[in-house]
Amino acid sequence: MRKTNLVTISLPGALQAESEKLAKKQHMTRSELLRTALRRYIEEIELEEALRVAETELKAGKLKLLPRGGLVKLMSRK
């Protein structure tokens, strides 16, 4: 049973050609390239939103900051 969904998209000719060249250069299929690009775009959007929230909280005096080295201490806890 298929675990993926088939999605059809339209690309301008130049973008399609560039994606083919890049996929070949990266030893990926076009689908792999486009999945990777979409994942990275989603991560970028999520990061931008997190930064907007942090900026809003910082301006409101609600942002909690870790002291220098605090992240390492948190990550080393078990």
Image (cartoon, grey):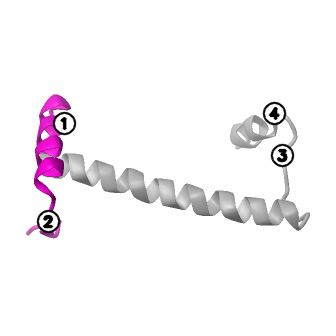
Q: Identify residue for label 2.
A: 10
Q: Identify residue for label 1.
A: 22
Give yes or no for residue 18 being in the magenta stretch. yes
**x then y, percent, for residue 36:** 30, 48
User: In front here: 74 or 28?
Assistant: 28
- Residue drawn at x 31%, y 50% is 37
Q: Identify residue for label 4.
A: 69
What is the distance, in whole Å, between disc 3 and disc 2 at their CAs?
46 Å
Residue range in magenta is: 1-29
Report helix, strand or loop for mark 1. helix
Question: Upstream in the sequence, badge 3 or badge 2?
Answer: 2
Residue type for callout 2: Ser
* Mark toward the viewer: 4 or 1: 1
Question: Upstream in the sequence, badge 4 or badge 1?
Answer: 1
Q: How many marks?
A: 4
Q: Identify residue for label 3.
A: 66
Query: Is 78 located above or below residue 34 in the figure?
Result: above
User: In front here: 46 or 67?
Assistant: 46
**Mark 1 nearby-residue class (10 Å; few <14, some 14–19, many ≥20):** some
Residue type for callout 3: Leu
